[in-house]
Amino acid sequence: MQFDAALAAQDTFRLAEAELGSDWDAAVELEETFSSNAGATAREAYEGLLTLATRHPNAHAFHAFCIYITWQQVTEETIARHFETGMRLSESYLSSLDGKDQQHVAYITELYESFRAGLGLYEEDEIQVEFRKDTPKGGD
């Protein structure tokens, strides 16, 4: 990756205060728990942050923050569920670019590809597409 997801998470979290309104204090508490713990405690805080995100569908900075911390979850606990969550969050974020910071759009696009790659969902280049077309199938 061409950027540090943890630093990007810090940047976007600070921007999320205005987006979350009365949920800001809960977000701060959950983020502190997530950042200062590991294992089940961190996972519970992470899930709480994702729940907050669902309550604020237009909180673009907070959604970017959740994608960045999902990458942190992937590096902490490399399981398919985290890659799938990252893909889902990224697809949702990238589905509309209105009002979103272009730097974060670029970062999240890169993370999206990393989440896909982690699940073995690579983009095929032209050579791979031609090879697949030319490869005999059963019965050929």
Image (cartoon, rainbow, N blue to C red):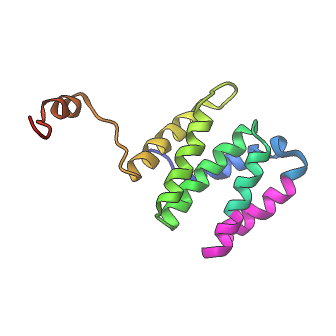
Q: Can residue 48 be seen in this view?
A: yes
Residue 95 x %, y %: 59, 30
Q: Is the stretch drawn in magenta largely helix, strand or loop?
A: helix
Image position of 117 (left or right of 53): left
Q: Residue at x 79, y 56 (%)?
A: 27
Residue 124 lies in the magenta-colored region: no
Quadrant of residue 138 within the rendered picture: top left
Q: Is residue 1 visible?
A: no
Residue 56 x %, y %: 79, 42
Q: Relative to 86, say whether 138 is above or below.
A: above
Q: Residue at x 8, y 34 (%)?
A: 140
Is 73 or 137 nearer to us in this picture?
A: 137
Q: Which residue is drawn at 68% across and 74% down?
A: 41
Residue at the extreme right: 22
Is 48 or 25 nearer to us in this picture?
A: 48
Residue 34 lies in the magenta-colored region: yes
Residue 94 x %, y %: 58, 33
Image position of 71 (left or right of 65): left
Q: Give the range drawn in magenta.
A: 24-45
